[in-house]
């Protein structure tokens, strides 16, 4: 269709929009977890038990909260984008396992599954031209 034929010229702008939108949402989703303190981090950290990792749940919960919050900010900026995308894929794999183990089923875990695919795709795409580190 002629209307959309020129949009390929703006791939990097489209990637910026996707990166900024998803990154902002990750930041807003992670901020309450990060500011929730050690009680919230322990609660999050216990989700690692689905991978048979049961030691220092406060550390794992804190790392999850930092990954979502700071990772979301880095996503928007395009800093360490592939590394952040990999960490977020891992974070969402744990979320998916937790949701399935909690009896939520496929529909209950669908948002986490979708975001895992988004960040897995970002891992291959990179940050694009419009990023702070421009790599």
Image (spheres, helix red, strand yellow):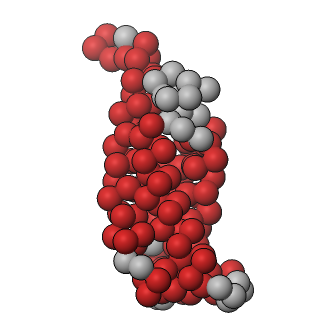
Q: Quadrant of the C terminus?
A: top right
Q: Nearer the viewer, residue 26 or 114?
A: 26
Note whether 11 is above or below 40 in the view shown.
Answer: above
Is any part of residue 63 visible from this angle?
yes
Which residue corresponds to the image point at 45% horizontal and 72% vertical from the top-left?
Answer: 109
Q: How many marks?
A: 0
Which residue corresponds to the image point at 53% horizontal and 68% vertical from the top-left?
Answer: 64
Question: Picture quarter containing residue 9?
Answer: top left
Which residue corresponds to the image point at 47% horizontal and 60% vertical from the top-left?
Answer: 68
Residue 44 in the figure: left or right of residue 56: left
Residue 92 in the figure: left or right of residue 16: right
Which residue corresponds to the image point at 56% horizontal and 87% vertical from the top-left?
Answer: 46
Q: Position of residue 130 (x, y in %)?
A: 46, 24
Q: Position of residue 34 (x, y in %)?
A: 42, 69
Residue 105 in the figure: left or right of residue 45: left
Is any part of residue 125 visible from this angle?
no
Q: Nearer the viewer, residue 78 or 111?
A: 78
Q: Position of residue 41 (x, y in %)?
A: 49, 80
Q: Quadrant of the N terminus?
A: top left
Q: Nearer the viewer, residue 31 or 4?
A: 31
Q: Position of residue 77 (x, y in %)?
A: 45, 37
> From this viewpoint, which residue is outermost toward the left?
3
Note whether 51 is above or below 109 in the view shown.
Answer: below
Note whether 101 is above or below 1 in the view shown.
Answer: below
């Amino acid at each position: 269709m002629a209307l959309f034929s020129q949009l390929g010229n703006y791939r990097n702008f489209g990637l910026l929009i996707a990166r900024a939108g998803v990154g902002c949402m990750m930041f807003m989703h992670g901020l309450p977890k990060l500011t929730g303190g050690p009680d919230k981090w322990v609660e999050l950290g216990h989700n690692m038990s689905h991978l048979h990792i049961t030691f220092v749940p406060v550390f794992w919960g804190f790392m999850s909260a930092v990954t979502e919050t700071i990772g979301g900010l880095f996503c928007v900026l395009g800093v360490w984008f592939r590394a952040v995308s990999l960490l977020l894929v891992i974070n969402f794999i744990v979320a998916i396992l937790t949701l399935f183990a909690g009896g939520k089923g496929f529909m209950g875990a669908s948002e986490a599954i979708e975001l895992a695919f988004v960040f897995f795709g970002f891992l291959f795409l990179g940050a694009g031209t419009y990023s702070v580190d421009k790599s």
